[in-house]
Amino acid sequence: MNPTSSPNGKPVLSASHINKSFPGVHALKDVSFELHQGEVLGLVGENGAGKSTLMRVLAGVYAPDTGELRMEDDIIHLQSPNDAAKNGIGMVFQEQSLLPNLSVSENIYLGYEDEFMRFGILQWKKLHAAARRQLEKVQLDIDPSARTSSLNFAARQMIELAKTLTLEERTDRHLIILLDEPTSVLEQAEIDILFERVRALKQRASFVFVSHRLDEVLAISDRVLVMKDGKVVANLSNDDGLDVHQLHQLMVGRDLQAEYYRESQQRPYDETVVLEAENISLSGAYHDISFQLHKGEILGIAGVIGSGREELCRTVFGFFTPESGQLHVAGKPVHFKSPTDAVRHGIGYIPRERRTEGLVLYLSVASNITLAGLRKAMHNGLIDYERESGIAREWVEKLSIKTPSIRAMCLNLSGGNQQKTVLAKWLNAESKILILDHPTRGVDVGAKEEVYVLVRELSNAGVSIILTADTLEETIGLSHTILVMRDGVITQRFDASSGHKPQQLQLIEYMV
Amino acid sequence: MSSPQGVTPTGLGSSALSQTRSDRERLLYWGKRLAQWAPLLALLALCLLIGLLSPQFFTIRNFIGIANEAAPILVIAMGTAFVIILGSIDLSVEGIVAVSGVTVVLLARNDFNNNDYGWLSVLAAILLACAMGFLNGFVHTRLKIPSFMATLAMQYVGLGLATLLLAGNFAQMRDPQIRGLVLNRFPVFPDAPANGLPYATWLAILAFILAYVIQRYTKIGRYMFAIGGGEDLAALSGVRINRYKLIIFTLAGLFCGLGAVIRAAQVGLAQPAIGAGMLFTSITGVVVGGTALSGGEGGAFNTLVGVLIVTVLHNGMILLGVNPYIQQAIQGIIIVVSVALTINRGRLKTIK
């Protein structure tokens, strides 16, 4: 699979046979690649393909289980981000790591103040001067004593880059900069500037660039590494007519397996409208969105990051209130000010971050299951523990939640079982509409299938579902109907009933 | 991924991982077990130690003394514990106790004015305390002021108000019925009347039971733990956070009011400093009992044990003739040590 690449000089970094497992997930499988001097290596793959894990291994956040990293002729062992920095590897973070309450200079040299101390006193002049030199490298003309919070995202991204470039002065090695989704918060014009700077910096450093937006990857990369299910499936040179579709096909790989998503059990939905959005808009997120959700329907929303689908999905659960337009639940206009209002209208939400959004980890499984519908466990105004246990046992059995006991803390459950507990919570609360926000993220393959089976059963039992999935495959496989969004508007609506499933490429056409 | 049966993609490398993990789990389990029982064991050990050193300790008389001393603190600490479980803190205890204590004395028969409202004065004092607790909650939730600041302000408002009500003096309680809370005992022993427990102390026990029932059997109790365990999560499950915070702060006010009445009946005197020391003692009791300051854990029973530890220790030091200044220092050290212990416990868990 390797050498379609055109090496210019010897590699500055080579990874061979890297493996990394987490409990239940084999995140990197035998990953090998080389990074050459002055090269921009694009890294693409679906969510869960292993891109982030690979980046974290390179940045010293995770140590690989097996395999080795070499720089020039030395084997390197990265135990921490600090080790990586010593070897000239720096990461520009997706969520910006600058402290907004400090000045630009302080941010650039955070942790290295000693270089500017004399007799224990910080020499501000020297610090600002040094910071200015770093800023020149990225051609950013701002006052280094400015408070970081006063700057826009594009400038902050440049400062991140400048901060990483300080590594030049601390290492003898060739500089390697990891860019993890650096464009996700930038406007097109700002992206152009970033790319221009990256190109200009190629004499100084090599880059690994991760982005969801394939057109960007093609615009900036010299070579593209495609990952899928933890493996490198292609290593392509970006000089001979590589296009977005080709990349996408490689990322998706396998043919759609109908039965994986229990397609044969997909029944037509009822015509009753349970939820309707009428021309709703939220500035900066989506505009003039209308759709209907029917009883028992699974409505998949597809779109890249920034398409507004996440915001739309969260609007239905009351996280955001649309600025104009109207939501209707069961034919009645509703106005959600908070998730509490949505819950009251029978809407449930399965979040992607179960550990921080789905479960109270220090409460028992039983208490979590009854949390949204405690009334059912009460008798004469008091909580009836027998009744609660009965309810919990019923759901634990129905959804086959694996737990040592119903009074065990949710903390001790695996990802898939936590997800099922969240589901049980909403089913106990008799939610009629469920919002599944990346329901299988961080869930291993076996548990994913169980979730698919459950989703199918719920839909057949008349629960309506709005789904934003991690992959297009999942969206197509599960949904009755698919809305495709781009730049905050719905660009196409697909019927995805059993036997009429659209192809991924058809969807992509309207996504990018 | 392609085979539907591929349920276990775990490689060989993870078996070692799961081994260490289960060891850690076991450690955590026993650690947690021990931590759960530690306060009670500490209380028993403390009793034994003091009993060995002082023959007066294991006497009915002394135990009743301990119960009486613990009574107002226990009641107040129930509210303090609830607020801490919620993940907030209530520093207004002494302010509320001052206002309520002064109110009950000034409205009942006393030597300062001509009022004589009897039980109504108790009701008024408790309602006033509820109102102050509600105001704490209101300022905290609606004006979004951190609870420590909102309640600290209320502390001083309360102390100021109480001083104003008394115009700088103090007043003696003359109401026989309210004083009777302390003087009348149950059960009645004709030959040894001092062996019965005063009504006021029974009242404190009832307050404890009430707190326990609220904690374990009501929505308020359940949501209190949910909010303390993760406020955002609770909100995502449809829990009305602000409403339940208001209820808890109001309840804390209620317990403070009841504690103030008991205290006022015990000392028979109203002065702004009537609650002096109660804030520190109640928080010490809560924390020593094993309720983590980070919220979401602990409860009424823990607090009962904690308050008893603090009271027994105080009692023991008096029996042993420890210098009062040293007594204070020891109290201070104990709270630091127990906070350190609860924080450690929290850390262990987040590591997981």
Image (cartoon, rainbow, N blue to C red):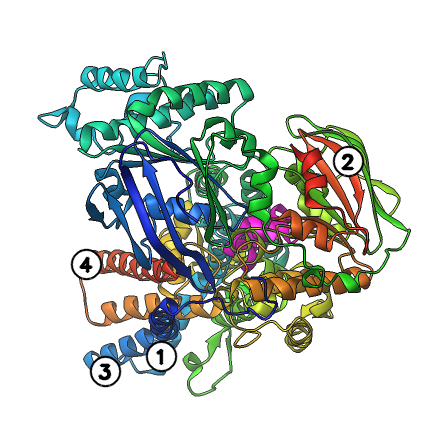
Tell me the kind of residue under disc 1.
Arg
- CA separation in Å, label 1 and label 3: 12 Å
Q: Which residue is mark 2?
A: A492
> Nearer the observer, disc 2 or disc 4?
2
4 or 1: tag closer to the N-terminus: 1
Q: Are marks 4 and 1 in contact (CB under 8 Å)?
A: no
Question: For the magenta stretch, what is the residue range?
Answer: B225-254
- Which is more foreground, mark 4 or mark 1? 4
Query: Where residue B239 sits: x, y (%)?
Result: 64, 52
Q: CA distance from mark 3 to mark 2?
A: 87 Å
First along the sequence among labels 1 and 3: 3
> Dot 3: few (<14), some (14–19), or many (≥20) neighbours within 10 Å?
few
Above or below, B344 relative to A41? below
Judge depth for marks 4 and 3 and give the one in front.
4
Q: CA distance from mark 2 to mark 4?
A: 77 Å
| Badge 3 amino acid | Pro
Foreground tag (3 vs 2): 2
The CA distance from mark 2 to mark 1 is 83 Å
A198 within the magenta span: no
Answer whether labels 1 and 3 touch (C-beta < 8 Å).
no
> How far from the left and from the top, in percent, is residue A93?
40, 36
In the rendered structure, find residue B55 and report the number of the disc placed on it. 3
Which residue type carries mark 2?
Answer: Gln
